[in-house]
Image (cartoon, rainbow, N blue to C red):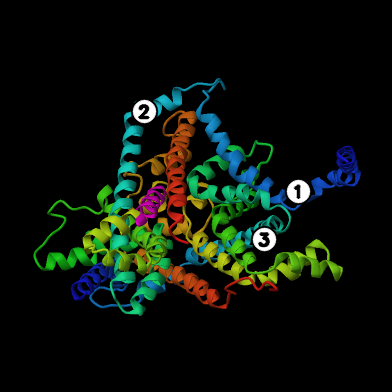
Amino acid sequence: MTQASISDTAIASRSAPPDARSGFRLPTHWLGVAPFFIFALMFLILPTLYLVVGAFQNDQGQYTLDNIRQLFIDKSIRDAYWVSIKISFWSATVGAFIGLAMAIAIVRGGLPAWVRSSTMTFSGVASNFAGVPLAFAFLATLGRLGLVTVLLRGIGIDIYALGFNVLTSWGLIIVYLFFQIPLMIVIITPAIDGLKREWGEAAATLGATTWQYWRMVVIPVLWPSFLGTVILLFANSFGAIATAYAFTGSSLNIVPIKLYAQIRGDVLHNPHLGYALAFGMIVVTGLANIFYIWFRTRSERWLK
Amino acid sequence: MKTSRFWAWLVFVVGAAYFFIPLIATFEFSLRMRRGVYSFDAYRVVLGDARFQETFAYSVTVAVFTILLGVFLVVPTAYWIRLRMPQLRPIVEFITLLPLVIPAIVIVFGYIRMYGSNSPLPFLGSARGTDALLVIGYATLALPYMYRAVDTGLRTIDVRTLTEAAQILGAGWTTIIARVILPNVLIAVLSGAFLTFAIVIGEFTLASLLNRPAFGPYLQNIGANRAYEPAALAVIAFAITWGCMSVIQILARFAPKSANRPN
């Protein structure tokens, strides 16, 4: 009996030819996705790899770490990374806290429903309103002839005499908040919706104060999505160039503007150092995104 | 409760002020071109500028081609992944997210080095080729949004049953995708298309580095040389973004909410 069943399985496994023949048809299966993969390879992956490999080569095509080392040695490059990271960090964290406060206000603050829906609509628009026009808007607001500057001067406060200048990295942070805050609102609102009313009631039943409810329930639940979004905002502003370029021309020393100048006219006098500059940007945004995905998966279990 | 509502209003009003003051200031600034009185002169100058019309028309054309390329690329792929190769989904999703990781300026830098006029694929050797590369670059940038929009759309229809029904009636793959699947995810495709349009229309980095006469570089150029026109252009650009997002919201109302599976 055992014997028979073994030979049965043997026969069963041997009667495979039809399967094997259909294995020959497998490649046609792949035809459906081939255009996509060829496109991604040619216009996304290979161009990036080209720069990454170039970052580790010298003019003779030999492999070297000199270009990467140069990123840290060259003072102007090091400064550019530092300023870029600083701008991205502050615009991300300030934008995140303001965005979070506004999201909590519209979801939990007992405001009328139209406030929430109009804020969400506006956030969708403002988070996509970046680039050159955004720079114009802030020059018309806080520039030397901008409305706010003029109005403040009218009541005796000359912000430019007080040392304010919109064409600096702090000015740029204020400008970036215009798309950072809405992006935070758009992403974090579902997470705040995910805070179940029952949790608050359960905490109250157990005698928790409002502060305890926030400290032991709300913050631990929101923390991963909040931190994840902060990192996303960081990456979002790190790679942005159009606003900064329209704003200050090439005077502000940040990495994307430096890379822009390098692509335009090899200002570093070393093409491979340019590749290394690009590679450094990928490393920073890549790391940021890895952390983002990590926090995202941690936060998702609360949002079911 | 009363205090919490007070704080909520305060946060909301302060936040709203930050967003509305620049918009009001920009609008006010754009009206100041004629000395002493408010006028729409800046708008008249801008809209009458031949360069404005040329660059805007160019960018609209590029946006349309970008959307077409995106649809051709994304719809069959997302469909095929759902129908036959779900095991590839993580890989494809990862690839579609890459343009959010790799900054646009890095992608175009790679293009310039790889597709120069003496490379095997000399896109940059001719103006038409560069236009094509610009469209390709924009399609790459829009890939994350387009893919997610289409994939969400596909989730709401029963891809397998529709395909089998079409096959029984004798339809080939092109017919299935163009006449069965595409009409069913049209709303999703359109919202992806309008988002793509909003991204492409004023894009600066790619157009500028590829030296194409697009709207983004024109904006930058006006900004560097004029006083009141930039404000008018900013208002126009904001209106375009607003328009695109409104269309997406309206489309979302027509989109089916859940899968209409036969059970």
Q: Residues within 10 Å of mark 1 (few under 14, many from 20)?
A: some
Residue A49 magenta: no
Read off the chain for label 1: A
In percent of width and height, residue B92 lies at: 62, 50
Res A262 → quadrant: top left
Q: Does the magenta segment cover residue A222?
A: yes
Q: Is residue A101 visible?
A: yes
Magenta residues?
A221-235
Kind of residue sitting beneath label 2: Phe
Residue assigned mark 2: A72
Q: Is residue B229 left or right of residue A297?
A: left
Q: Is residue B225 visible?
A: no
Q: Main secondary structure of the magenta part?
A: helix
Residue A118 locus on image (x, y percent): 37, 75
Give the residue pinned by disc 1. Answer: A30
Please identify, in this view, whether the residue under mark 1 or under mark 3 is nearer the observer. 1
Three-letter code for the amino acid on which mark 3 is drawn: Val
B153 vs A79: above or below? below
Whether discs 3 and 2 lie on one chain: the answer is no
Residue at the (67%, 56%) spot, across then down: B73
Residue that mark 3 sits on: B75
Tell me: residue B180, above or below residue A218.
Answer: below
The location of residue A125, given as percent across then percent down, is: 42, 67
Q: Judge left or right: residue B188 versus residue A292.
A: right
Residue located 45% across and 60% down the image: A303
Say which of B123 and A4 sits in front: A4
Identified at 46% across, 32% down, the residue is A276
